[in-house]
Each structure stands twice: as structure tokens, then as C-alpha cells.
Image (spheres, grey):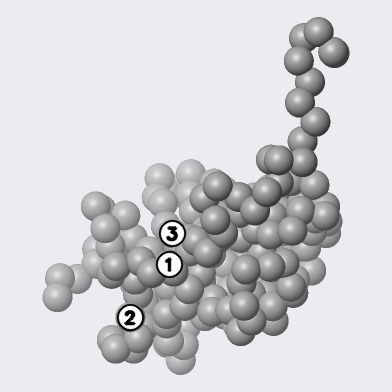
Amino acid sequence: MPTIDHPTLPLIKAKFADRKLFATEFRGQATLIIGKADLIEVMAFLRSDEPCQYDFLSDVTCVDYLNYPGAPEADNGSPNGRFAVVYNLVSYPHNRRLFVKVMLDPTLDTSGTEDDPGLHIPSVCGLWPGAEWTEREVFDMYGIRFDEHPDLRRILLWEDYPAHPLRKDYPVTGRGEREDYIVVDRDSA
């Protein structure tokens, strides 16, 4: 297997030698896969350590691997789960980019909006205040709850929306939400 050539990975490996960390590379972009218990400590190191200086959190997003061919497998020892919360970090002083991924596995049925303890992850708003809106979007669309988030509520859909529509088990045509809208045309407006 080829070695992943990213200058930040040896620093992380040295600092967190006692942790189970995994790295992958695709098209020249490195991804670090960590456990959710290590998220805040690793992210604080990446942000504050002088040789790292990932001073900009470009994006927080999520991937639903339900029925995905080639989804992360547990046979190589790497963490797996249905959902991956992905952080896109940029170091402007060093002109580098690193993706950090945390895998989550639901413990309840995902067809509704129940608060699933398996889909909780610490918020990084304390490190990058700009994460507030992107974490809210991930919560709204996927139902991932960010613990200690300053204002975790829906950002794109109304509060009583009955599901999280970017989950793969959500029907493509919806569950009848569109049928309840009042159609307003030009003559009646």
C-alpha cells in the first residue's frame, strides 16, 4: 500500500501515538479518520499547533453510506458507520488542506426525527465559530446532533419538519409535504 504523503499526518501520529487513527488519500487529498471521542482534542491540535495551523474550517458536511458500494468496511480495522461527518480544514500559513472524518452509526430507526444517541458528536464551534451554520445544516438535513452547539435548530426547514431529507432512507418524492402547500398564483396573490 502506498504511503500517504501529507506533512501534517506525521505530526498527528507523533502527538496521538496512543490513539487509533486512520488516513486515506484520494486524488491527492488526504483524509484523517478519527473517533468522535478524540474529535475536539485532535481538532484543537490541528488548529493551534504551530506546524499545523489549520486556521480555517472551510466546511462541515455529512455523507450517508447506506447501501453505498465500497462503503468503509471494518475488516481493515478502520472505523465504520453509516454516517460520516466530514470537516474540511485549510491552513493558510502553510497552504495545505486536510479532511477530517468521524464515522457515526445510528442506534435507532432513522426514518423519523428521534434523538438517536449514536448520532451525537461534539461541536467544534468553540474552535471555529463559523462552524455554527454548517453544523446546523448537517443537523437539519441528516439529524446529526452537535453537543454544546450554541444554537442547534433547523436552518433550512421549518422546526416541525417530520424527517431529515438527505438521509438515504428518506423517499425521493417526499412523504406528502408538497401536497399540503397552498398554491398561490398571480390572480389570487
Could you say which is closer to the camera, residue 137 or residue 27? 137
Give the secondary structure at mark 3.
strand
- Residue found farthest to the left: 1
Q: Where residue 177 appears, x then y in whole percent?
A: 71, 46
Look at 46% across and 88% down and name the residue there: 19
Q: Earlier in the sequence, mark 2 or mark 3?
A: 2
Could you say which is closer to the camera, residue 188 or residue 87? 188
Q: Amino acid at mark 3?
A: Phe
Q: Amino acid at mark 1?
A: Tyr
Q: Circle 1 is placed at which residue position?
A: 65
Q: Amino acid at mark 2?
A: Glu
Give the secondary structure at mark 2.
loop
Could you say which is closer to the camera, residue 21 or residue 174? 174
Q: Quadrant of the C terminus?
A: top right
Q: Quadrant of residue 95?
A: top left
Q: Earlier in the sequence, mark 1 or mark 3?
A: 1
Q: Quadrant of the N terminus?
A: bottom left
Give the secondary structure at mark 1.
loop
Q: Circle 3 is placed at which residue position?
A: 99
Disc 2 from disc 3: Cα separation? 19 Å
Q: Circle 2 is placed at which residue position?
A: 73
Confirm whether residue 46 shows in the render: no
Disc 2 from disc 1: Cα separation? 11 Å
Q: Where residue 23 appears, x then y in whole percent?
A: 34, 72
Look at 61% across and 60% down and name the residue there: 142
Tally the marks: 3
